Image (cartoon, rainbow, N blue to C red):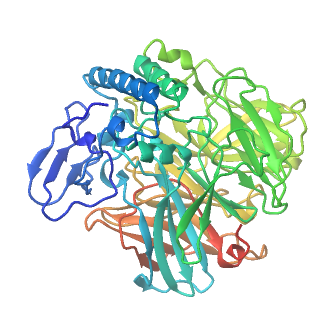
Amino acid sequence: MASSTSIWAIPQFPYPLSSSSATLELSFFPSQKWQPKRNKGINIIHSALNSPSVIHFPKQTFPDSRENVKPTKWNLLQRAAAMALDMAESAMLSRELQHPLPKTADPRVQIAGNFAPVPEQPVKNSLPVDGTIPSCINGVYLRNGANPLFEPVAGHHLFDGDGMVHAVSINNGDASYACRFTETQRLLQEKELGRPVFPKAIGELHGHSGIARLMLFYARGLFGLVDHKQGTGVANAGLVYFNDRVLAMSEDDLPYHVRITSSGDLETVGRYDFEQQLKSTMIAHPKIDPVSKELFALSYDVLRKPYLKYFKFSPDGKKSPDVEIPLPVPTMMHDFAITENFVVIPDQQVVFKLQEMITGGSPVIYDKNKKSRFGILSKNASNANDIIWVESDNTFCFHLWNAWEEPESDEVVVIGSCMTPPDSIFNECDESLKSVLSEIRLNLKTGESTRRPIISETEQVNLEAGMVNRNHLGRKTRYAYLAIAEPWPKVSGFAKVDLFTGEVKKHIYGDNKYGGEPYFLPRDNNSESGEDDGYILSFVHDEKTWTSELRIVNAINLQIEASIKLPSRVPYGFHGTFIEAKALVNQA
């Protein structure tokens, strides 16, 4: 790609400017061309939500890929192909950038403020702590998130960023912090080339330019300039500790095995296929049954049938045969639920239609003519012959928090946040997003369903990202801990919701302080202890002081127990987990 004087031509974030470097004040308005203004001070970015961000850009520049690759790596044919394809990409970009980007693909909106990426940080020990860390908390809190290594050259959605895991290790009241990229095959190849070359699934793959970008990518693969056969995923969404391994996941690839070192640092072991048992992608929200310790998962395909497969793993990592779930069209299936005996599969109205790109649209669309439904399948099913489908009109839940069985009424109860407009995360729309915590009842005998908001209309608030006590997953639970996603997409606090009464108790982070997913950590794994006997862990960022902390809150009374002050900024991110110190002893 030809070099550019645009600020996006500087390809990499993770190096601070020297004290003598020039700084930039950037104003984010999607309808305006992004022009840098030279100013003294710091790099200030104003997002659509008026969140000033401090971002340090590298002073050094990376050479164009044609100059960056060692001459011994590519033969003459490959060099000629690289030059031709780079010229084609440059011409395509010049045309593409003549048109304004939608907010859902505009990097000036998607990675502004504290959504902007940060560099890796080695372990920092003996962090300052306000309050007292509860003595029962010993282990490592991990949180995943999107953190692009390279600055986007075109469209970029928040979900497109490279995976970075942030780790806070706690040992008898002492805390340390580190953050590292998950070294996916995608990241390693782009790092070697010195620029982004893999298509971004949401930010770039729309319309004719998306088709052209796919053709360029596969042409590079044909000439051996990139290798897409080892996976194209970013591993930026989910985290799970299973079979003595930390797995970082996004639904577009296999999981990646990440190891926690004895010092509290992180290292990527590699793409993990469960010892050659897993041949397909795996969604980022597998479920571990708290009793059987089995892991349950789904895999969806947007190109060919079967569009959906279900499988499980025994506690020692042995995979079951795939169960093919018949779907008429490929469906966006980010999450699902389990009960004691069933898996609950949402087949909703956000679908993949790649042909929409031919007419200039997005391949991820809301299909209003499709019926939303839930499939109830036995956990031990060997095929999908006995799956029970129950329709639930106009229901789209990006996340499902829990589900359980009520045999006396022949119902499965599903707890989720119903989102409208359903595709608002992916496609720009004028309607304000609403995420309503809902109870959905699926009658397995009559095939009928009901849905009701759990919180009264007067107290309604957008609730997204969160969990129940995972020791009770798949069983009837009273409490859910969910992020208060206001002002969207920021998180101003979290709510403890009584799922039986609708009572809401809130913990608000404070003036100009925002966080992410609240993680519930039980005080102990004794099933006889109270369901809410534990702590909430969440990263919190102060947009006034531009500092971050790990906040530990008592889950019963919502009072702060401790605040661990972090040595560097932690961007807003996605999902997390906690691994107890005694479990790490057996880490693979």
Can you see residue 510?
yes
The vertical placement of 541 against 442, above or below, is below
The vertical placement of 390 against 244, above or below, is above
Front residue of 480 and 76 = 76
Residue 355: x %, y % from top left: 54, 15
Can you see residue 558?
no
Front residue of 91 and 135 = 91
Q: Residue at x 86, y 49 (%)?
A: 341
Front residue of 284 and 384 = 284
Q: Residue at x 55, y 56 (%)?
A: 575
Residue 442: x %, y % from top left: 77, 38
Q: Residue at x 52, y 83 (%)?
A: 133
The answer to whether residue 221 is left or right of residue 448 is left
Residue 264: x %, y % from top left: 54, 74
Q: Quadrant of the C terminus?
A: bottom right
Q: Residue at x 73, y 23 (%)?
A: 305
Report which quarter residue 190 is drawn in: top left
Report which quarter residue 429 is drawn in: top left
- How many marks are shown on the rendered structure? 0
The answer to whether residue 500 is left or right of residue 96 is right
The answer to whether residue 171 is left or right of residue 64 is right
Residue 60: x %, y % from top left: 24, 52
